[in-house]
Image (cartoon, helix red, strand yellow):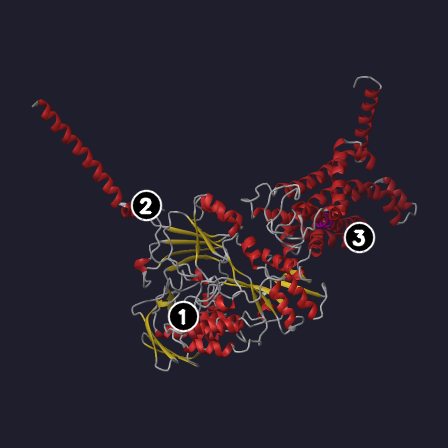
Amino acid sequence: MRTTARRLRGATLALAVTATLASTLTACGSGSGASAAASGPTTLKWASSYFPTHWDPVVSGSGAQFRLLSLVYASLTRTDENGKAVPDLAEKWEYNTAGDQVTFHVRSGLKFSDGEPVDGTAVKAAIERAKTQKNSALFGDLTSIKEVTASGQDVVVKLSQVDHQIPQLLGQRVLQVASPKAAQDPAKLDQTPVGAGPFVVTQLVPGTKVVLKKNPDYWDAANIHIDNVELVSAPDASTIVSGLQTGVYNFADLAPAQADAAKKAGLDVFVQPGFNAANISLNVNKAPFNNPKVVDAVRHAVNRKEFVDKLTFGLGEATDQPFPEKYIAYDPASKNRWPYDPEKAKQLLAEAGFKPGDIKLDLVIPDATPAAEIIQSQFAAIGITLTIKVDKNWSKPFFAKELTVSVYGTTGRDSAVQTLTAHFGPNGPLNLSTPYQPEGFEAAVAKVRQTPLDAPEYPEALRAATRAGLESRALVFTYSAPNLLAKSKSISALPANPAHIDWTGVRISGR
Amino acid sequence: MVRRVLSLASGRLAVGILLAIALLAILGPLLAPQDPLATSDNSLTGPSAAHWLGTDYLGRDVFSRLLDGSRVSVVGALEVTLMALVVGAVPGILSVYLGRVFEWLTLRIADTLIALPFLLFAVAVTALLGNGITQAMLVTGVLVSPLFYRVSRAATLAVARSQYVEAALISGASLGWVIRRHVWAKVLPPIAVALAQTLGVGFIIVSSLSFLGIGVQPPEPTWGGLLASDLGYLDYRPSAPFVPALLIMATVWASNLLADAIRDVSGESGRALVNTRKAKANQLAAGGTA
């Protein structure tokens, strides 16, 4: 009897201990949100090597900086994880039957951070500014747009041709919408951005640092879980990993050479999908590239594997097109069209009447990069002497199409057609040989524009346009660099939105 | 003076190091075992029999690049030094004799040049005139020249007011003769000290600029450039920056050591120091005690 009582007391005690432990553990498990809330506001500390010079999206253009401007600016559409246009400021849109007019319906009740309403008029003003502002980097992308009219929350975009790419085009890269009131003074907007994006700028030190706080009026504010952002211009690449380790930053883009060190430091190292593609730009309007045999020699001189091995440490991939291999616009039929064959390259040069050493050119580049040194050595191997000239004002002669040979790397576009026309179009900014364009390219691109993106024939039409573009003698593609990023483990995974850095749904645990 | 400098151990060491660096600059490109610009598939490898200091990010032989890069570094440092000497020392001496206007003007120019940050100015000049080491070094030389101006002016002032110089002038000696005969001999030692010092500064400047990628077009190797590129691949070759950094440090240290040695043996006190040392050496050789 006494033994039974003792056992009962023991069982009761065990139950009590178990219950206490269980309740404690449950509290720990379910209380993570509460503890995070208790830990105070969360801050993203981002070191970026693409820190924008310009904060006016019209001036900044479609380059990699758009990822940072998207902290401040929302766009008419955005792209999802498949690269397809989905609603952003516009909640829906529809084409007319002819396909030459598209009507966007802007969400109602939204406002810019200066209190101005987000409506059809604001979107109209943004498109027209991008088309007409003197220093716009975007006007070349909007040639299909003939006229824009606005009525309440609706904006009607009338096109000069049938073009089903418009919703793809008017995303983060081309139509980040600024407050029309703030845009009346573009110079001020350039250093004081005012948008309707997920964050609002509270402090901006040009070229160095920008501090932002969450925008409670953002249309998708419920899915933004970061309270503050401190964005800084990344210092030397070799210091990024230690900055991440010590908590100076908790997010940064990373040079491939630092990937191993970051992994060893226990950081989350990941590759965001993207459309990066580097190229050698040739001017076929100038000697010696006005000789097709010399261009063919260069095409055969390029050893893409060397770029991938030495510059990306195997994390990138070789590409002979303006897209990486897995992208919808990549044309498998054109793969390896001009394989690496230095002997054939030398033979082609001889046929063109050039002996080794006869061709001496300046390779003009904006910054000293190992890629230029690789190109120099590969050209030297077939007898072309390149002298590397670093020109800080490189963009001026490059975009004025004055250079004979240079290099460029694109981070891609959300619209594959935009990528193609930028590279191969007669006035494409990345076509060093303006007004030259390959035969059949214009018709192939027109066919893509006329094809709805969900039509079964769309992928083939797109690849055919790529195939036509690749006949261009003005560009030789080399490799696709990885979008390599490193983050602290306290930051949850980012949406795998190709070529974008999207903070929707991302959480930071602790401070 | 050379003999007196070499009589000091520190002087011999400094001259030895600087001679070795000079030989590297002259013969380095010829001694390089491999083409310093030739890339290979073996990138970022450690030291081996084929590559004594390993290979860089493009598979180039680091030892050959160091040897080849010596010339640019040495020539750049010499350009700074000689430019500073010519632009600084001559007006410094003449400012004492060519009247108040010239004196006032050169003093104000020297004050202005001292106020300009030479590294920043060199960057601006390369942006304006193109990315070349010579223009960057020559401009830097002009900005460093106030050191020579002040040193030579101070030494000249000390001599110009001495009785024997005044006597020479009263006796009808020309200004040129006085400067050659009396002033130059007195001004030379402090200028030699400044020259050695500026050589060290020149090495730091040329290394700093090439570290920043200014003045030298890739793929031309320089010590500073090698150091900069090595820092990007520390995870693969952690010891890589050691050799270029050591070369820069040793050269700057030797220049400063030489400046100290010249200062120690200059003037009457220097002569006394050398004579005392010689006397001690003779006593020791004769078996006596110091």
Return the mark for residue A39.
Answer: 2
**Pointer 3 local density, CA inside 10 Å: few below 14, some 14–19, many at least 20:** few
Judge if badges 1 and 3 mark residues of a common chain. Answer: no
Per the image, label 2 sits on a secondary structure element best described as loop
Check chain identity for marks 2 and 1: say if they share one.
yes
Q: Nearer the viewer, residue A264 or A179?
A: A264
Q: Is residue B72 left or right of residue A8?
A: right
Task: Give me the disc on residue A168.
Answer: 1
Residue B66 vs residue A397, the one in the foreground: B66
Question: How far across and how far down the image is residue A268, in percent?
Answer: 42, 48
Instruction: Report how far apart the C-alphas of labels 2 and 1 lie in the structure.
Output: 40 Å
Q: Which residue is mark 3?
A: B99
* Left or right position of A68 against B16: left
Task: Give, as a single range, the part of the protein colored magenta.
Answer: B71-76
C-alpha distance separating marks 1 and 3: 76 Å
Question: Which sits in the foreground, B204 or B247?
Answer: B247
Three-letter amino acid code at disc 2?
Answer: Ser
Give the SS element for disc 3: helix
Q: Residue furthest right?
A: B171
Q: Is residue B219 magenta?
A: no
In space, the residues marked 3 and 2 are separated at their CA atoms by 74 Å
Residue A331: % across, % down: 48, 68
Above or below — where is B131 with respect to A442? above
Q: How many other residues sit within 10 Å of disc 1, few (<14), some (14-19) or many (≥20)?
A: many
Q: Chain of mark 2?
A: A
Tell me the SS state at disc 1.
Answer: helix
